[in-house]
Image (spheres, helix red, strand yellow):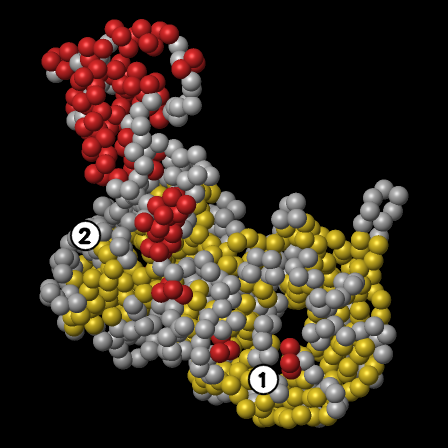
Amino acid sequence: MVEEENIRVVRCGGSELNFRRAVFSADSKYIFCVSGDFVKVYSTVTEECVHILHGHRNLVTGIQLNPNNHLQLYSCSLDGTIKLWDYIDGILIKTFTVGCKLHALFTVAQAEDSVFAIVNKEKPDIFQLVSVKLPKSSSQEVEAKELSFVLDYINQSPKCIAFGNEGVYVAAVREFYLSVYFFKKKTTSRFTLSSSRNKKHAKNNFTCVACHPTEDCIASGHMDGKIRLWRNFYDDKKYTYTCLHWHHDMVMDLAFSVTGTSLLSGGRESVLVEWRDATEKNKEFLPRLGATIEHISVSPAGDLFCTSHSDNKIIIIHRNLEASAVIQGLVKDRSIFTGLMIDPRTKALVLNGKPGHLQFYSLQSDKQLYNLDIIQQEYINDYGLIQIELTKAAFGCFGNWLATVEQRQEKETELELQMKLWMYNKKTQGFILNTKINMPHEDCITALCFCNAEKSEQPTLVTASKDGYFKVWILTDDSDIYKKAVGWTCDFVGSYHKYQATNCCFSEDGSLLAVSFEEIVTIWDSITWELKCTFCQRAGKIRHLCFGRLTCSKYLLGATENGILCCWNLLSCALEWNAKLNVRVMEPDPNSENIAAISQSSVGSDLFVFKPSEPRPLYIQKGISREEVQWGVFVPRDVPESFTSEAYQWLNRSQFYFLTKSQSLLTFSTKSPEEKLTPTSKQLLAEESLPTTPFYFILGKHRQLQDEKLNETLENELVQLPLTENIPAVSELLHTPAHVLPSAAFLCSMFVNSLLLSTETKSAKEIPEDVDMEEEKESEDSDEENDFIEKVQDTNNTGLGEDIIHQLSKSEEKELRKFRKIDYSWIAAL
């Protein structure tokens, strides 16, 4: 039984991995990235999340390695704290309370007891670079209120601040100005591009800055795609700069290599450019990275680079410009048209991904599974170009079919509309295009739904459109003389007084179809397609429509744009109840009668959970989000919870997820998903599933008592491998000091032979005679061997407890005698 705790809104994943630059560990084994309120630690080899560092109460805005201890990590947040972590064990070491919002974090090796941060104190749009002194204290929470001003009127983005030449100076850029502050002289030099004085709208605004690690050289990126290298900036009059130009659009980020021999740049072209020796002629490219490069990072060892992209992706790149790993988060599209769906097969969250794709995202592992290319056209990154948008999608027939709608409209009279139906292929384990329908309607499609009733004989799809019609599509035989095939065709077209069709949905048993035409709801028989009845409350256009489920299947719910929630009884064809509620999201739970509705107010978003049979809500939670909630979905649980409180029972069978306007994915829980299954517990589970090979017994841990008892019960049925602790050759090999052992080639054959299974069932007739002769010749050594065997058995008895003692066979005794007669005189020469 679950301990009764307060349900709270937790961030379950999908946070931006590209919000700030990623940071490498000193040995390049790990990479750190901010992810909402957390810091995630990934392996650069396996791409798996090793740790989730959670302790901040607001958005994490910066991370840096501790320059005095490469096994520690600093992080800062909008909650006004700087935290020091042991990232190997995922442990919080210390918390420094600064007291004001921190927008970025920087560390310099020369400043041992200080870090640098970007803060805003007076006005919200004016930011300052300050030095924060971190006092030394044994307590875990320390106040760090001593701030020293460094630079004023700087950009909020950490890409516009860079420390150079081992912390001798710091460079900051904003708009058309470059400021350089020298720590020893405590002076500031400011530079302005000459062309910007005469042109107000010139495209040479500063966008980012990077400093050479050992030389006095500053690289700045600009809106026009140029890179400028500044030198001699100690003198305001004698400074010089040279230009490098390849990018056709703004330079998003710059980074020098560890030695400073190369400069890396990236932008909207999705190409990483390496400028070797900072010259125009000597440059290398890594193209087709998939999305705009927003950040570039370099490992302290210099062997790895990484790029953060606008599609919430991090690509780890080797020094020779070869991509080695990809860490893909939830893709943040410009807008989510398809809503949130659940793939019935993989239980993955499905929604719009990168342009023209559907992304399948695992909620359990917070990791993208794969992308499905729907539009199947090359994407052109041009803001002035009207793209083909994936607007609708729906799963049907328990995941066997997928329907998608894509459209492009340049003018009101020029609509390009296409509907595709995809069939799941068990061999390829993916969806294959089955039917393509051009212009299924004369206007935009507003809704589509499958009939997912268990007793449905024929797959059925319904589409509703602004052209005033809804169409019924069925699966038919499309075979010919060449092959057997199936395809989709239109079976029925319905309308109601030429009103725009806005929503459609099937009842749970598939016997009824509800279609809303603006303010009117119509009920149709799904067999004869006859109009049965209509509901009209004149409360505004129907925004959401859904049937009740299980014991509440006789009810139909509708939410209007004027903020009225209506519930109709299908048996009496009358209004059961209504409530004034500005519903933005309404989702039924597939495993219960519960329905979740999220309303929008001036303060924020509120959640209401209710049953259609009772107008009184089962659960209400105010202020689940300050911003607008756009989509929601119920996800069936693999293992049901056991909440006893009536207010929490709606979470027993399913979990509710919702997506905000800023595309933050949130859910309701008594504890965060990271607390339920941490990476450490995952590792323990992985260790328990290791195969029981001989090397597992040598290098791994012994089985637990439960495994031993289980082995005893299966002892008569399974063939057991001999324990390696009982083999004298292995014991001798492991207990002999390494510096007196012979070469590995000499011991290899003997070691492998000792691991082989012996045939103990041989009769006396099957034993060769030469073995008997050899036993007689070696009878002199038998007493010594017996003594040795008894000692080995005694040690095994004390270590193994209740385990069965392995009896040496004659073949093993023979091998042991050979081992004992080996000449060890070579040791004397050491």
Tell me residue 17's x, y (percent).
Answer: 41, 59
Q: CA distance from mark 2 to mark 1?
A: 57 Å
Going by the numbered disc 2, the residue's amino acid type is: Asn
For discs 2 and 1, the disc positioned in front in the rendered view? 1
Tell me residue 454's x, y (percent).
Answer: 71, 66
Q: Residues within 10 Å of mark 1 (few under 14, many from 20)?
A: many
Q: Nearer the viewer, residue 308 or 239?
A: 308
Residue 785 located left or right of residue 562: left
Residue at position x 52%, y 51% from top? Answer: 290
Residue at position x 21%, y 38% from top? Answer: 798
Q: Which residue is mark 1?
A: 611
Give above or below for 816 relative to 595: above
Judged from this view, the residue extending furthest toward the right is 481
Going by the numbered disc 1, the residue's amino acid type is: Lys
> Tag on residue 69?
2
The quadrant in which residue 450 appears is bottom right
- The quadrant of the rendering that contains the C terminus is top left
Q: Is residue 687 visible?
A: no
- The quadrant of the rendering that contains the N terminus is bottom left
Q: Residues within 10 Å of mark 2 (few under 14, many from 20)?
A: few
First in sequence: mark 2 vs mark 1: 2
